[in-house]
Image (cartoon, rainbow, N blue to C red):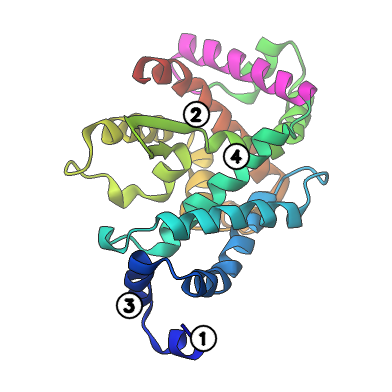
Amino acid sequence: MEEKVLDEKTEEELWRTYKKTKDPKIRDFFVKQYAPLVKYVAGKIAIGMPHTVEFDDLVGFGIFGLFDAIKKFDPDKHVKFKTYAVTRIRGAIFDELRSIDWVPRSVRQKTREIEDTMRTLEASLGRAASDKELAGALGVSVKEFEKTMLKISGTSILSLNDVWFTGEENDNVSIADSIESPQSMNPETIVEKEEIKRVIIKAIEELPEKEKKVLILYYYEDLTLKEIGKVLDVTESRVSQLHTKAIMRLRAKLTNIKKGIL
């Protein structure tokens, strides 16, 4: 199929043709059209990542996700391709980051230590622990605690994309999906998936107000950390800290629940 002919067809027509024929020219047309989306997703993920993680590498990982999205997209499901593709692109990037094990062992150990402390402390308090309480439980000063939170902030976004399987093949949901798609919370969809989302949404609702706002503004309203800082009237580094603490609280809250669901 010639490019001129492709341009004359609607996207819906192209998807229906591609679903039937798997024409490589149509596939290449979609790759070219949605390549900017890969850069956009990679750019979002790159924020806060260590300088050792190259943006071009993230884009390369994301292209695999775009190919996967094009291959598996079903136009009959009435979901916009862009929405579907973002999840696949992001998933491909995080899968590759996990496989190359880019997080330093020391950072991973410190993250685990803080999460364990947070889980134990907040369970006994019955509420979100303050920085002072967490620092005290860890045996460090508040200033040291804040420095540590900044150091590990680049790894927390990975945690948010941990997958929660619903039991059906190729059907899963991540914490990020639950933040990004509050409108999809309806009883008509799969019961197992809704239960997992309900648990995640409840955990998000129980976060301290500023941390909850950071998650919603970043993942749902699509603001940058700098823009969120202006909205909340705090520095960008403070936003990064709030983001990290929010993710760690979620992971702490959900760890035991997750074991019960799976």
Q: Residue at x 30, y 52 (%)?
A: 183
Mark 2 crowd level (few <14, some 14–19, many ≥20, 10 Å Cα) = many
Of 27 and 151, the residue lying toward us: 27
Would residue 257 be found to the left or right of residue 115 on screen? Answer: left
Q: Nearer the viewer, mark 3 or mark 2?
A: 3
Residue that carries the numbered disc 3 in the rendered image: 13
Q: Does residue 201 appear in the picture of this structure? A: yes
Instruction: Give how far across and how far down residue 90 sits, in percent.
Output: 55, 49
Q: Residue at x 27, y 44 (%)?
A: 185
Q: How many numbered circles are shown?
A: 4
Q: Decide which of tag 2 and tag 1 comes sooner along the chain.
A: 1
Residue that carries the numbered disc 1 in the rendered image: 3
- Marks 4 and 3, how far apart at CA: 32 Å
Instruction: Give how far across and how far down residue 111 sits, in percent.
Output: 68, 23
Q: Decide which of tag 4 and tag 3 comes sooner along the chain.
A: 3
- Which region of the structure is painted magenta? 105-128
> Within the magenta stretch, is there residue 15?
no
- Marks 2 and 1, how far apart at CA: 47 Å
Question: Type of residue at label 3?
Answer: Glu
Q: Decide which of tag 4 and tag 2 comes sooner along the chain.
A: 4
Q: Decide which of tag 3 and tag 2 comes sooner along the chain.
A: 3
Question: Type of residue at label 4?
Answer: Asp
Instruction: Give how far across and how far down residue 85 sits, in percent.
Output: 47, 57
- 113 versus 30 height, above or below: above
Q: Residue at x 63, y 35 (%)?
A: 156
- 16 versus 96 height, above or below: below
Characterize the magenta stretch by its predominant secondary structure: helix
Tell me the element at label 2: helix
Mark 1 crowd level (few <14, some 14–19, many ≥20, 10 Å Cα) = few
